[in-house]
Structure formats: C-alpha cells, structure tokens
C-alpha cells in the first residue's frame, strides 16, 4: 500500500472539541498541530501560507478524511478510522466561514443565509424569517433581495457569517474571514465578528496569517511553522516571549490600545504623541521594535516620546537582540548585538526609551 505522510492535530479535552487529527498529502508534507478549544473560547491557528492551516480546516470540516486519530465534538465521534466512523460534512454541526465567502451567485442574500435551514427541511417561510433576523443582526437590513454580485466585500462576508451562525453550529470554523477585505472594512467587520463570537457558546477556531486578528480575537494563539506548532499562549505570551525567529517577526509590532485626541494616544499608564492629529476615539497604536531607540541617558533631539524604564528581558535571535521594557509601557525593542555590548545592557538595566511620533501608526480600534 502507498505510504502517505501524516498530519497530526491533537485536541484533547473533556468537552467542546476533542480530536486527534491524523492525515497526510502525497507530496510528503506532514503537520503536527496540538490544539485545545473549550466551549465559549476562541483559539487562533496562526501561521504563514503553506504551514498546513488549510489541511486543518479540511480535516475538521470533513472535506478530508482522517488516516488515523479521531475527532470528537461534544462527545460525539465525527471521524474515527479505527472504528470505521465518518460523519459527512453536512451532518457535523460545524459552521464554516471561508475567506472567499462561497456564496451561491444565483441565490438572493436571504436565500444564501437560509440555505442551511432549507437543507434541513425547515419550511421556506420560517427559514426566510430567521434569515431576515440574522441579516438584521449583522447590519444588512434591506439587502435580502440582492444577489452576491451586488454586494461589497464586507457585505458578502457578513452574509457568510450569518449563514454559518443561523444553523446554530456546535463549532464555528473561521478560515481567514477578513483576508479579502480592505483595511477600513477589515477593522469594521472585526468588531462585528468580535461581537458575535462573544455570544457564540461553542468552541471557535480562527485560521489566520494576521497576528493582529489573532491577538485581538482569540483567547489563545497556536502558531504553526512548517506544519508544526511552535508556540501556544495568549497574545502577551506570543508577543513578549517569542520562541522562534519567525514568531519574533510575527509578533514584532507592539500593539497599544488607547484613546486618541489631538495627536495624543492616552493609555491607562502613559500618553503617546503620534503624527496623526486628526484621528479621535478608541485606537490601536502600532510600533515596530526597530522604531524604538534605547539610551543609557535621557536623549536629546527631536523624539517627542521619551521616558525612563528598565530592561526586563533580553533574547538573542542571531543578528538581532530583542529587549522587553517595563513600566509605564511594556514594549519590545530590537537592537544589534553590538549595540547591546556598547550599552552594556543586562536584565534590570535602567534605560531611556525614545520613539518618534511619526513612527507610531494609528488605526481605529
């Protein structure tokens, strides 16, 4: 018999999603992805293209069968080759939101949202009423008679979300749900998605290559590299304590939440001067580690953001050194090994931080 490389995904828990996915591809690609998702919690599978994230989606949704292992959802076996069990996709109780929406172009928006209910023999009138209620929840009142081709990308993604949630799935699977949207629409829909995830009581798995999405939407982040899970933790665990160079790059940008007004972003512990003086309200400020300068004495010159702090952690990544700073803002800075030696820095060293206002990117949060 032909031997196939196997993908392994372990999800072990007493409720919610409990699975050990084992499958493979003919090209020899192998994946090993441990996950744990409790009911009412969101896990993110974060990694680059080619990491195996799509294989995980296909295995969980039933588009690919397991070679070995098992999938249990709320103590029901969905796929267990050892016991000859395989539940087809339409009977798994899994709602999937795909990156490219997969809406039926010949159906109206209402018919697309109601499709799952109609497939279960729910009467047309009842299915249409429930679809209209969901369209109202996702902010698409009045668009029920349109066809998908008449929608914007953000509107189409909302339809896909409503279609997944209307069936009251046991597991919500979100496959790059915001990747095809422009930046402004992505921020708006991320808020909508966050609101609906908060009210969904089952386990949720977010597949993404965007660390901002993972950090903002997930309770726990699972990072994949080359088919292997290299780190699991909260957003702060990943950002502050990266275990590989890839994760260090992935989590590189510091995200600071605050309220903007008149060119200042106020956070609970510190105010940042930013270059954008027009934006106002809740924002996310993004600061790249290389935009943060570290000094032994109070710096002179143009930077409008300077403060005294201490080095709490030093990590070496080849030709780069990552420094964690403490109060009033926990940030990650990046310098060279030569700069580390020249500054004679050790953990606990007192330093001054400086950041130019123009180096801080601000977007509505």
Image (tube, rainbow, N blue to C red):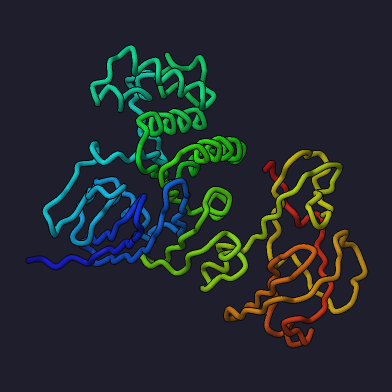
Q: Would residue 314 be found to the left or right of residue 243 on screen?
A: right
Task: Report the front residue among 20 and 281.
Answer: 20
Task: Report the front residue among 9 and 71.
Answer: 71
- Location of residue 312 (image quadrant): bottom right
- Location of residue 260 (image quadrant): top right
Q: Position of residue 43 (x, y in %)?
A: 46, 53
Instruction: Please report the residue visible at 48 percent of the width from the left and 65 percent of the height from the top.
Output: 232
Q: Position of residue 114 (x, y in %)?
A: 35, 22
Q: Position of residue 226 (x, y in %)?
A: 38, 67
Q: Position of residue 150 (x, y in %)?
A: 46, 21
Quadrant where the image shows the C terminus: top right
Q: Would residue 162 be found to the left or right of residue 88 on screen?
A: right
Task: Report the front residue among 148 and 256.
Answer: 256
Instruction: Please report the residue visible at 37 percent of the width from the left and 16 percent of the height from the top.
Output: 128
Quadrant where the image shows the N terminus: bottom left
Q: Would residue 208 be found to the left or right of residue 344 on screen?
A: left
**Furthest residue toward top:** 125
Instruction: Please report the residue visible at 34 percent of the width from the left and 24 percent of the height from the top.
Output: 105
Number of on-image labels: 0
> Is residue 182 visible in this depiction of the protein?
no
Vertical position of residue 69 compared to residue 263: above or below? below
Instruction: Please report the residue visible at 33 percent of the width from the left and 66 percent of the height from the top.
Output: 32
Vertical position of residue 183 compared to residue 324: above or below? above
**Furthest residue toward front:** 14
> Is residue 218 visible in this depiction of the protein?
yes
Q: Would residue 352 be found to the left or right of residue 122 on screen?
A: right
**Furthest residue toward left:** 1
- Location of residue 119 (image quadrant): top left
């Amino acid at each position: 018999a032909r031997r196939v490389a196997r993908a392994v995904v372990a999800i072990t828990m007493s409720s919610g999603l409990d699975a050990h996915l084992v499958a493979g591809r003919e090209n020899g690609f192998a994946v090993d992805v441990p996950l744990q998702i409790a009911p009412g919690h969101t896990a993110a599978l974060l990694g680059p293209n080619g990491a195996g994230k799509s294989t995980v989606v296909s295995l969980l949704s039933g588009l690919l069968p397991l070679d070995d292992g098992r999938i249990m959802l709320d103590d029901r076996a969905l796929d267990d080759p050892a016991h000859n069990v395989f539940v087809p996709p339409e009977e798994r109780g899994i709602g999937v939101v795909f990156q490219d929406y997969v809406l039926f172009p010949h159906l109206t928006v209402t018919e697309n949202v109601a499709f799952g209910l109609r497939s279960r023999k729910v009467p047309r009138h009842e299915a249409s009423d429930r679809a209209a209620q969901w369209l109202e929840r996702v902010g698409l009142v009045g668009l029920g008679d349109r066809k998908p081709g008449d929608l914007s990308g953000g509107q189409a993604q909302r339809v896909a979300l409503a279609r997944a949630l209307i069936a009251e799935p046991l597991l919500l699977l979100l496959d790059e749900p915001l990747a095809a949207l422009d930046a402004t629409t992505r921020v708006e829909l991320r808020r909508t998605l966050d609101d609906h995830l908060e009210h969904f009581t089952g386990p949720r798995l977010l597949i993404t290559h965007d660390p901002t999405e993972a950090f903002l939407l997930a309770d726990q982040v699972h990072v994949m590299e080359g088919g292997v899970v290299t780190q699991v933790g909260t957003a702060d665990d990943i950002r502050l304590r990266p275990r590989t160079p890839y994760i260090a790059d992935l989590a590189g940008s510091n995200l600071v939440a605050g309220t903007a007004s008149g060119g200042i972003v106020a956070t609970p512990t510190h105010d940042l001067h930013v270059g954008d003086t027009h934006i106002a309200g809740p924002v996310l400020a993004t600061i790249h580690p290389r935009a943060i300068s570290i000094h032994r004495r109070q710096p002179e010159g143009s930077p409008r953001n300077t403060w005294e702090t201490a080095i709490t952690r030093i990590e070496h990544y080849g030709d780069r050194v990552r420094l964690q700073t403490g109060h009033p803002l926990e940030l990650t800075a990046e310098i060279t090994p030569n700069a580390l030696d020249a500054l004679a820095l050790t953990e606990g060293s007192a330093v001054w931080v400086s950041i130019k206002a123009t180096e801080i990117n601000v977007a509505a949060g």
